[in-house]
Image: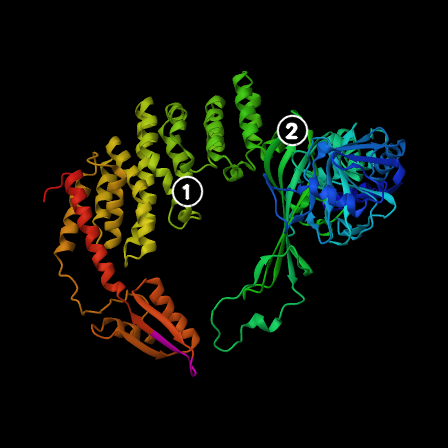
Amino acid sequence: MPGMARERLAELLDASAAPAASSVYRKLSATDLSVVVDGVGPLRFPVSDEQGVQLRGLGRRARFGRGEQTLTDPEVRDTWEIPKESVRIEWTEAFAAVLDGMRAELGLPPHCELTPELHSMLLYETGQFFVAHQDSEKDDAMVATLVVTLPSAHTGGELVIEHQGQTKKYRGLKTAVSLVAFYADCRHQVLPVKSGNRFTLTYNLLLTGDSQDAAAEHPLVSDLAACLHTHFTTPVVLPYSHRRGDPPARLAYLLDHEYTARGLSWSRLKGSDAARGALLRAAAERAGCEIALALAEIQETWDAYDPDEDEDAWYGDHEDEDPDYGEDSGSADNRQYVLQDLIETTTTLAHWIGPETGRLEDISLDLSDAEVASTTPTADMTPYSSEYEGYMGNYGNTLDRWYRRAALVIWPRGQGFASRAEASPGWALDELTAMAGAGEIAQAREAARSLESFWHAAGRYAGQTELLGKALEAARELDDAQIAAMLLRPFALERLVPEHGPAFAGLATHYGSTWINGLLRDWSEGWRPGSYGLAQAPLEWLENLPRLCTALSVEGSPSITAARRIVGLSWTMFAGQVGPALDGPLTSRQEAWLTALGAPCSGIIAAATRLGSTDVLEDAQKLARTAGGRAHVLAMATLRAAGAQQAGFGELAVHCAERIRALLAQPQRAPGDWSIELPTGCACELCEVVDTFLRHPERRALDWPLAKDKRRHVHARIDDAELPVRHETRRQGRPYTLVLTKTEDLFERERLARECHEANLAWLTDDWKVST
């Protein structure tokens, strides 16, 4: 069984590596260190309060990094940094011996060396601290940090280091120098100093030499290679069934330490990761496999609960409480939750060291559980982010945790192209184009066919526009209609941009109208009513439709036919999504949405005019003539996006002017008329009362004793329709009283609407030359 092979491999690797510490402590005599600071002179150990005052005079608030920013915030890091250029340090030979001992205890081999590079000198006064954090790698060769605490009479200020759920606390000494080295991925903090001053020197520890030993002759290599063979030849039992699928395509072994993209390197693996990496490289070679070093993003979702949470609050049985919303979710970083069952794990490879280039490459590859192995469970490590979701009614409490781990990714050498292509489709398309361009057409087609089982997912990768450009080029070079369709099928029509026009037009000419129509049908699948993603269709893409159609029109009739097909599909999608939403009252939310659709609608009409697509133009005019304020807003937004007197829009401008004149001809509201129309919808007894109140031309207020759930329903009807009615709850008696009051906004809205109509009519008359 592949699962058994994965587990056996993890067990072998667990037993292979000697225990390696993540942090190491040493101490030296005060006579082994000499520190001279300009303006202060030689420091005398233990450092006195008098010299502390002098150092404080030289210091500035220490900064810290957050993402790409460098910040100063005493709530996060409260300490003073002495200018590094003012500090001169000399060590005795004992320091080199300590560093070598630390190297060994950290699990780095004897042929490696740790070189200290001074980063800063710090002063922590009473009450100062540094919250939990991880060090960034200031140099490509940096693997660890060294904190040297100078002798001084202080209490508190302990250095607390956490790794894989284990916490160690280190204190400074009064008469000796304390040294603590720890890997850069360890989360650590400095607790508040309780009394006195804490003085430290911090070093970046740079690694020289390859952290991996040669492992080809290690006795475990044969056993590990056998595990790989079993893993890649045993079919997987499919989830939720007893049927068997194909054997796993790869194996990702998760390492114990965390690495950044900058620090990811075979030669700088930390502790036991280095030994296990060397063994797996040797085993992969013996098993006929390829191996890559990668970074993985892992999300675990747990069934969990907060031990301090009031269970009675889950059921919400509280008499008539307002407001109606609680606060059950948010960051869980600083709280302890009880984990119960693991619900789901998602593992995604985000970067790797290219097997051929040796350079860091961006990739995206989701791994199944059957493709992942580890010696240390992810749950035993420290997440970089957590989020707790309280009880929501349909499911229980959940805790999401996110981790970053390095991984060794292995796959059979014969599946190398497909394995790399699934992680990096752009690389695969470049390779196919290069092979075909070099005359290796048969090999390129065979490689392309190996992608078919997973290529349908290529449409979810980042950089779709660039990826489609590469796919269009490869589809032409391979000169095979079936393969070309397979490579292009995963994309969506909205990824086609004007820059793709010549390549797409060339394919239309080369493969013919039947082939291109089939491709366009596949690309527009997500636009059809009922298809997933319809509401998310990027309508903004339609703004550039005229430019795209111009680019397609260059190559001749086959591409012009394709352009007309694209315009027709675009209008079908647009009308199908927008048409049903044109019925009903006009709210500010609807107005903003329809106004934003003006540019996409204008793009379709302009493209249809350019191509002579009369059926699309006729349908657009019909849609614009739909009764109601919503259609008018869309029509006006379309005209404003088009610009004055553009071909294809004249009839729409005339219709809008006629509609505005009809609106302005209607009688205005009388000063004392307070009647309001409630939009159609719910016909319950509550809404009947609301409707009766709203229609009354003289009545302005209604006092209405109502229970909480009924008040909510009335609130929702008024707010959803954005009626000029204020609703308040008078918290007296049982039940409370809902007070509805019609506001002066009723008259102000009608005044502003009339001014808007007059301005629009003037614009149509002046810019579109619509006759009065």
Q: 469 or 696, which lies in front?
A: 696
Q: Amino acid at mark 1?
A: Glu
Residue density around tag 1, few if under 14, some if 14–19, many if 20 or more, within 10 Å: some
For residue 455, side relative to residue 185 (left or right): left
Query: Where does label 1 land, which residue?
Result: 525
Please tell me how crowded label 2 is: few (under 14), some (14-19), or many (20+) other residues with Cα within 10 Å.
Answer: some
Quadrant where the image shows the C terminus: top left
Q: Secondary structure at mark 2?
A: loop
Q: Earlier in the sequence, mark 2 or mark 1?
A: 2
Relative to 479, residue 668 above or below: below
Can residue 348 be seen in this snapshot? Answer: yes
For image coordinates 58% across by 27% down, the residue present is 447
Q: CA distance from mark 2 to mark 1?
A: 35 Å
Tag 2: amino acid: Gly
Corner quadrant of residue 5: top right
Task: Report the magenta residues as a range.
Answer: 732-739
Q: Is residue 26 left or right of residue 610?
A: right
